[in-house]
Amino acid sequence: MEKVSIYLKIPYICFAKKPFKSGFKKVQKKLNEKSENIATVGDQIFTDVIGGNRCKMFTILVDPINKKDYWYTAWKRPIENRIKKHIKLEEKEEK
């Protein structure tokens, strides 16, 4: 992630304690932007999306880059996959 932030010339905070607001607020302060002007991009619903939503930021859920997760992420993936599947079904029904 640090390499991406350097390449894109955007701030990056390591160990942001997501989904707690403190890390998100730290980035907001660093950017000196209103929360509604900030997008949070992440591959985890229970950290990235929930944390960004709690701070009134625009959230973008992406697929994980790596297929292998750390133990503290791996146990959540099946739950997240069920949620994503449910959302996709709802979107399909709306069309």
Image (cartoon, rainbow, N blue to C red):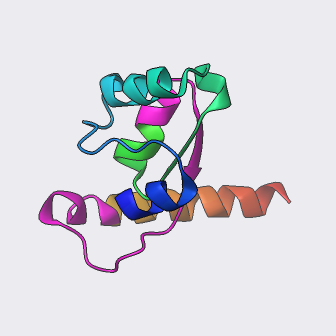
x, y percent for residue 23: 33, 30
- Residue at left 60%, top 56%? 87
Res 13 seen here: yes
- Figure check: 32 above or below 11: above
Report whether 35 appears left or right of 82. Answer: right
- Figure check: 22 above or below 52: above
x, y percent for residue 19: 33, 35
Instruction: Pick whichever, 43 or 15, lies toward us.
Output: 15
To which quarter of the image does residue 43 belong? bottom left
- Figure check: 94 above or below 57: below
Looking at this view, name the residue that lies furthest to the bottom.
67
x, y percent for residue 75: 20, 62
- Figure check: 27 above or below 33: below
- Residue at left 60%, top 22%? 33
Residue 18 is inside the magenta segment? no
Res 1 seen here: no
To which quarter of the image does residue 38 belong? top right
Report whether 73 appears left or right of 67. Answer: left
To which quarter of the image does residue 78 belong? bottom left
Report whether 71 appears left or right of 64. Answer: left
Report whether 43 appears left or right of 68. Answer: right
Q: Which image quarter holds the N terminus? A: bottom left
Q: Which image quarter holds the C terminus? A: bottom right
Q: Which residues are magenta?
A: 51-77
Residue 52 is inside the magenta segment? yes
x, y percent for residue 34: 62, 19
